[in-house]
């Protein structure tokens, strides 16, 4: 075994652990933000929040699956949301399991299911969401940017 093979295995294991911890942190952040009523769920709803009060946005999640990869309108919205997030230094990640994400953010029994393609974690008070999950995700995004992965993908933990 060469040194490159050995360090490559370490990097793969570290990336897997980093991804798993980011997935757990994302789930924790979304559950916490939902309890604090700091979630905006839906592409159009998120665009409105970004337009009206961009400083309140703390984190952005874009979700998709194979069924929606060919939806041109949705991809255009994703591109615009990504550009807005990059311009305003808002950390953004992609999640490929939209059904799992929809389960996490859920809705009340009286409401119809929400469009979970875009989820914003907002914070009317900047100190209210200063928790370890948001910090972990911020570090994950920063590390991803350091290796030129501008829109990192996170895998949510299984239930």
Image: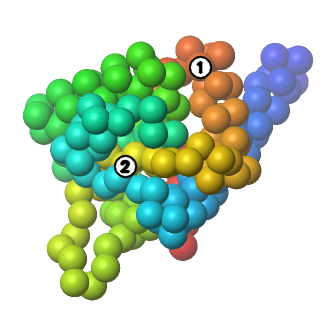
Residue to which mark 1 is pinned: 145
Asked if 87 appears above or below 32 in the picture, the reply is above
Q: Nearer the viewer, residue 99 or 84?
A: 84
Q: Residue furthest front?
A: 125
Residue positioned 56% across, 14% down in the render: 148
Residue at the location (41% across, 56% down)? 39
* Horizontal relation, residue 98 to residue 20: left or right: left
Residue 89 is situated, as x and y percent measured from the top left of the image, at: 51, 22
Tell me the quadrant of the picture where the C terminus can be found.
bottom right
* Residue pictured at 13% horizontal, 38% vertical: 71
Distance, label 2 to label 1, CA atoms, is 21 Å
Vertical position of residue 153 compared to residue 65: above or below: above
**Circle 2 SS class:** strand
- Which residue bears the numbered disc 2? 119
Q: Nearer the viewer, mark 2 or mark 1?
A: 2
The quarter of the picture where residue 7 lies is top right
Structural crowding at the residue carrying mark 2, measured as other residues with C-alpha within 10 Å and reported as few (<14), some (14–19) or many (≥20): many
């Amino acid at each position: 075994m060469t040194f490159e093979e050995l360090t490559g295995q370490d990097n793969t294991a570290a990336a897997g652990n980093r991804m798993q911890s980011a997935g757990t942190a994302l789930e924790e952040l979304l559950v916490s933000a939902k309890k604090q009523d700091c979630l905006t769920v839906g592409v159009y709803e998120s665009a409105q929040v970004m337009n009206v009060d961009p400083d309140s946005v703390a984190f952005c999640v874009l979700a998709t699956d194979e069924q929606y990869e060919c939806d041109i309108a949705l991809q255009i919205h994703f591109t615009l949301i990504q550009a807005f997030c990059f311009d305003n230094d808002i950390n953004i990640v992609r999640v490929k399991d939209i059904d799992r994400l929809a389960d996490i953010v859920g809705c009340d029994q009286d409401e119809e299911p929400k469009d979970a393609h875009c989820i914003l974690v907002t914070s009317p008070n900047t100190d209210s969401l200063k928790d370890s999950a948001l910090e972990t995700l911020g570090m994950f995004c920063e590390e991803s940017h350091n290796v030129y992965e501008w829109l990192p993908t996170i895998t949510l933990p299984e239930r």
